[in-house]
């Protein structure tokens, strides 16, 4: 892939670039650290302002735009987490929804009055105002532990087998939530889950994060979107640092050729386990966000088809490219909401999301298996120095 | 806090039974019922195992081929043979019922078989031409699974009124379950007899087709070493198509048998769970191995029933999944282990 690209651009001299997308990459690489931060702040700031100043062509007529954006950041966090597992380490995890469920249920079990383990209230150790926030790290820890427990036995399997085992795991989690009715309240679910109590006043007696704050542009969806966006940026920075570290290079090595990586001294099992645990923890964070926003969890929200949807986000955006998968998450959340209530030949287009996503997967796998925004995989494996080497070589050729 | 939780959990563990007496008392009944489930799993599992043997690919969309077979059988009974949904069983006498069932089964086989061929041609063949990675195949299979399910969910009701949609079809009960005889104190119903006989005949036929015929030899040759097989004059493409066709046809037959057992189970999402279980069965017996799939199907059906008796009905699916995970961890090659290609000629 990269070989062909370098040939193409070798003839288009002087630019010294490897592919069209590299104009952007080049510009980004040339900025100094301060400028990068500035650009990032401005871009994410603009994104954060979207729910308030919604352009007409973006708006979702059938449903609150703030709520859509809140769902988007949750799925984006999931996609970033799943991207660590699928895109970075190359482990196909079809049961990722299980981690999402564990995160959501951890918060729910600790803070819902319906749960037997409720800790909010007179005899609990969580205060009403801070319960949700206190549960978030707990949810991440529990989910990471779940990832560890699942990973240790299963990560010795490869490829297809791993996919099916994780699928089974995702389904088992849902069945547990359904069947352990005395703890999880079964299919009736757990309600009245804690949420951050901020800015309480007469108009909004339960604060801006409560689902009572449902009107206007600054509704609770928008507030959850801001909260989620902040968490997403933190996760992005952490994952980005991991990618550039020894761990990230080990993941790429495992993805490209597991045997070769093992021979070169990479402890493949350990790093696969790390990918799994980190991915799981991020999934748990998203689950906690979900539980807080909706204030209700039930087993049907964690059907296995959601796992596939998360996978669509990652594959669509480009496996391994963390900004790409955020775009993928935006597509899978935004399009169904945008098409809600749009009828075509008597079919509600909003209903057809899985059909469209299925078609998109099939077409994409045939014509562009690397996704819409592919990561520069092979070059990443060689590192930045290789790219610089190629570029200077091209420059010299052009100069000669 | 910890003590509290442990105590609470001990109290609340009532959600999981551990009732060995139930297993011992109903042992033969559970076994016979499990056999009829297992026969259905086995037929679907053959589709997974053959495709895996030849292409090293988990045909994730096979469960949807099965689902289409259910709708095919239903369409045949309802529209072509004129049975409308009814609470009571039709009583047509043994001979006529068998004829009707055979017609419906052949129709379901046609639907499933052509769907499997179409799936191969639309989704997998372009990928093979491009030498795609195994994960690409799996993701495509998931995509096709979505497409087929949602086709039946939303598009089919607009093409043929009254079919598909989000609810299960009204059941057509052609055979009223009725005890025919008892064995070791376990009653054997006519439905069980039909399922077991039909599945046995089909399994034997498939086994003969794979192990004795020219095409079967071709399939085994491609499974063993596709390059050499091609050099020896075996058309790889044709063999792959045959493989998908056999898998699809058996899934169609299984769909009709499933319909007899669970008349109310005809729904767009009905293939998923059964597909996963059939895949587990294939893995249990040794994926890529035809007889392994048949054996694994029967074992899974029986063990699932035992598990259900011990832990409670709602844990039935969990038993199947845990079994799959355990088999993959302890013996990933399955019970019989051998692959299709290595089986004796």
Image (tube, coloured by chain):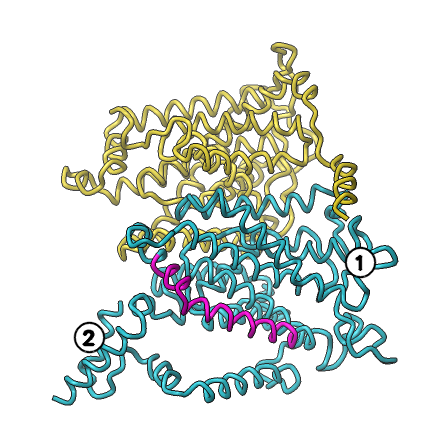
Chain colours: A cyan, B yellow
Q: Is residue B200 visible?
A: yes
Q: Secondary structure at mark 2?
A: helix
Q: Which residues are magenta?
A: A225-253
Q: Residue at x 61, y 82 (%)?
A: A48
Closer mark to the observer between disc 1 and disc 2? 1
Q: Residue at x 55, y 68 (%)?
A: A76
Residue carrying label 1: A125
How crowded pointer 1 is (Cα within 10 Å; few <14, some 14-19, many 20+) is rated as few
Q: Is residue A246 magenta?
A: yes
Could you say which quadrant of the image residue A290 lies in?
Answer: bottom right
Foreground residue, B127 or B96? Answer: B127
Expressed as whole percent of the image width and height from the top left, the position of residue B71 reads 54, 42
Q: Residue furthest top?
A: B184
Image height check: is A181 above or below B300? below
Q: Residue at x 68, y 47 (%)?
A: A177
How crowded pointer 2 is (Cα within 10 Å; few <14, some 14-19, many 20+) is rated as few
Q: Is residue A100 magenta?
A: no
Expressed as whole percent of the image width and height from the top left, the position of residue B236 reads 23, 43
* Secondary structure that dominates the magenta span: helix
Q: Is residue B107 visible?
A: no
Foreground residue, B172 or A219? Answer: A219
Residue carrying label 2: A7
Expressed as whole percent of the image width and height from the top left, the position of residue A246 reads 39, 64
């Amino acid at each position: 892939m990269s070989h062909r690209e370098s040939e193409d651009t070798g003839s288009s001299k002087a630019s010294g670039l490897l592919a069209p997308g590299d104009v952007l990459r080049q510009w980004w690489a040339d900025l100094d650290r301060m400028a990068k931060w500035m650009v990032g702040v401005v871009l994410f700031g603009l994104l954060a302002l979207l729910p308030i100043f919604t352009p007409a062509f973006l708006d979702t007529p059938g449903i609150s735009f703030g709520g859509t954006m809140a769902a988007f950041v949750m799925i984006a966090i999931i996609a970033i987490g799943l991207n660590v597992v699928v895109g970075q380490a190359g482990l196909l995890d079809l049961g990722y929804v299980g981690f999402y469920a564990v995160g959501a249920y951890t918060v729910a079990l600790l803070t819902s009055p319906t749960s037997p383990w409720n800790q909010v209230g007179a005899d609990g150790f969580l205060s009403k105002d801070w319960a949700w926030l206190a549960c978030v790290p707990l949810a991440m820890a529990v989910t990471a532990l779940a990832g560890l427990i699942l990973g240790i036995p299963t990560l010795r399997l490869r490829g297809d087998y791993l996919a099916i085992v994780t699928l089974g795991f995702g389904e088992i989690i849902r069945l547990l939530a359904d069947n352990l009715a005395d703890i999880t309240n079964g299919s009736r679910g757990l309600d009245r889950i804690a949420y951050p109590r901020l800015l309480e006043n007469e108009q909004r007696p339960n604060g801006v994060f409560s689902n009572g704050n449902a009107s206007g542009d600054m509704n609770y969806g928008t507030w959850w979107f801001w909260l989620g966006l902040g968490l997403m940026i933190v996760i992005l920075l952490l994952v980005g640092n991991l990618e550039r570290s020894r761990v990230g290079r080990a993941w790429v090595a495992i993805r490209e050729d597991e045997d070769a990586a093992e021979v070169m001294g990479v402890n493949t099992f350990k790093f696969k386990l790390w990918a799994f645990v980190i991915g799981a923890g991020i999934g748990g964070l998203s689950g906690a966000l979900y539980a807080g926003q909706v204030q209700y969890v039930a087993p049907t929200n964690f059907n296995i088809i959601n796992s596939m949807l998360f996978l669509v986000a990652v594959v669509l955006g480009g496996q391994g490219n963390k900004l790409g998968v955020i775009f993928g998450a935006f597509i899978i959340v935004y399009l169904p909401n945008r098409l809600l209530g749009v009828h075509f030949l008597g079919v509600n287009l909003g209903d057809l999301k899985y059909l469209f996503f299925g078609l998109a997967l099939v077409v994409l796998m045939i014509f562009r298996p690397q996704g819409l925004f592919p990561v520069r995989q092979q070059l990443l494996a060689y590192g930045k120095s290789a790219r610089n080497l190629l570029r200077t070589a091209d420059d010299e050729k052009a100069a000669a | 806090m910890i003590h509290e939780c442990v105590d609470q959990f001990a109290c609340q563990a009532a959600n999981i039974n551990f009732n060995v007496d139930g297993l011992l008392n109903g042992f033969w009944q559970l076994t016979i019922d499990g056999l009829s489930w297992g026969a259905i799993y086995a037929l679907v599992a053959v589709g997974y195992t053959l495709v895996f043997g030849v292409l090293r690919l988990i045909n994730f969309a096979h469960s949807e081929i099965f689902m289409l077979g259910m709708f095919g059988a239903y369409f045949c009974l309802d529209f072509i043979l004129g049975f409308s949904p009814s609470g009571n069983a039709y009583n047509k006498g043994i001979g006529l019922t068998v004829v009707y069932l055979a017609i419906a089964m052949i129709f379901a086989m046609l639907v499933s078989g052509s769907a499997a061929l179409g799936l191969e041609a639309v989704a997998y063949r372009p990928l093979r031409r491009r030498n795609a990675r195994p994960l690409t195949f799996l993701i495509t299979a998931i995509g096709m699974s979505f497409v087929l399910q949602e086709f039946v969910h939303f598009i089919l009701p607009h093409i043929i009124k009254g079919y598909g949609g989000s609810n299960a079809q009204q059941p057509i009960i052609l055979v009223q379950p009725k005890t025919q005889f008892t064995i070791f104190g376990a009653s054997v119903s006519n439905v069980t007899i039909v399922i077991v006989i039909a599945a046995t005949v089909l399994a034997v036929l498939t086994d003969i087709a794979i192990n004795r015929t020219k095409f079967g030899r071709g399939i085994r040759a491609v499974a063993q070493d596709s390059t050499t097989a091609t050099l020896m004059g075996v058309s790889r493409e044709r063999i792959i198509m045959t493989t998908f066709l056999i898998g699809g046809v058996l899934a169609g037959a299984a769909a009709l048998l499933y319909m007899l057992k669970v008349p109310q189970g005809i729904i767009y999402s009905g293939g998923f769970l059964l597909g996963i279980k059939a895949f587990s069965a294939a893995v249990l017996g040794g994926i890529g191995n035809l007889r392994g799939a048949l054996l694994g199907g029967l074992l899974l059906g029986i063990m699932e029933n035992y598990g259900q008796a011990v832990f409670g009905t709602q844990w039935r699916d969990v038993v199947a999944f845990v079994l799959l995970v355990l088999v993959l961890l302890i013996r990933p090659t399955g019970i019989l282990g051998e692959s299709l290609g290595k089986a004796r000629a």
